[in-house]
Amino acid sequence: MPLTVVVAPDSFKGTLSARAVADAIAAGWREIRPDDDLVLMPQADGGEGTLDAIEAVAGGIRHRVGDVTGPDGRPTPGEWLELPGGVAVVELAQTSGLPLMRRPDPIRATTRGLGELIRVALDAGATSLIVGLGGSASTDGGAGALAALGLALLDEQDELVADGGRALLDILAIDRSDLMPAPPGGVTLLTDVTAPLLGLTGAAAVFGPQKGASPDEILELDAALAHFARLLGGDPNQPGAGAAGGTGFGLATAWGARIVPGARYVAELSGLAERIPTADLVLTSEGTFDEQSFGGKVVGSVLDLAAHKSVRAGVIAAQLALDPKVWAVSLTDLAGSTEAAIKDPAVWLRAAAAKAARELP
């Protein structure tokens, strides 16, 4: 009998969009079981691909605005999505993401481009804002974005401090008088982590190494974020405050933004929770399945939804660093090496999906 298979993957960062991953999985599955009903529902969690995933389910108009400040100061193209009702969607990874860096620079990388893009969207008339947080190159507490929105971060000479996480230590005073007001419809922050701002589970300690931070730089960045938090106020312990190098904290504090789990938000927007109970099987996918996958990421969220509805699930990952406790396959194992899997992930996604189609029904 034909099966109904929901395909709900995340993007493969820097290589394939969630839609491209879903298409490759569908192609591989159909090689073995062409009569099954495949329901493609690309997902996102606030990180890379969030703009694409929301556009895929909600439509809207994409606006390309020219160059904004990239995470290392070089210009990078900016774009935002206009949804009906005056809703603007922006994605931090698209303006301030780690892949945009020529080389890692964890202490000087900035979120300024995100703020510049938000300003453009609000100047265009947006009345509410959705911000995807994830995949950042910086650990600046969102200070760069807030500076672009008019927040003045002043040193002891009453001069504006430089961009970057280390420069937060130079702040003596904060002037909010020129800070652009939050849109009247509010600001929603989509996060892919539940980390607080500070400490052993915070932005610098957990995610700093991914951005190239040394142990000494991690300590310095954590101290800088703590100093920024004391001056700005707010709750550094709020779940998700550590998202995107502390940008969750910065925007939540300065603008009263609401932090929500991005994977859950996109799943609700796309109707995934309603679709899963009608399926015989759910396939989800990401680059690396590890302990962070159940901390707010797409794959963990999809597996939780499937388990809650008693629907079988499978995981296709480029690398499996943790047992997901469901059927799973690694592209690295199929390809013979990580390098081979990364070189042409679409080919190995199709092979993995064909394997799933043979083994799961």
Image: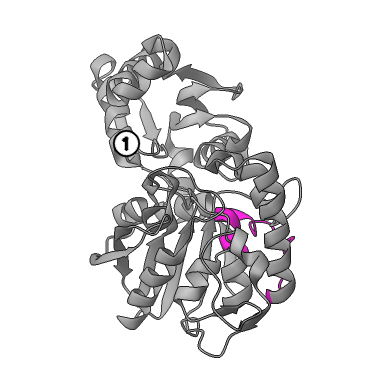
Quarter that holds the C terminus: top left
Identity, as a three-letter code, of the amino acid under mark 1: Leu
Quarter that holds the N terminus: top left
- Horizontally, residue 338 falls left or right of residue 253, namely left
Residue for badge 1? 16
Which residue is at the front of the view, 30 or 18?
18
Stretch in magenta: 232-249
Quick check: 80 above or below 54?
below
* Residue 340 sits inside the magenta stretch: no
Which residue sits at x=48%, y=39%? 277
The percent position of residue 327, horizontal first and vertical second, equals 52, 19
**Which secondary structure lies at badge 1?**
loop
- Horizontally, residue 224 falls left or right of residue 326, namely right
The percent position of residue 287, horizontal first and vertical second, equals 45, 31
Which residue sits at x=27%, y=33%? 23
Where on the picture, by quarter, is residue 173? bottom right
Where on the picture, by quarter, is residue 22? top left
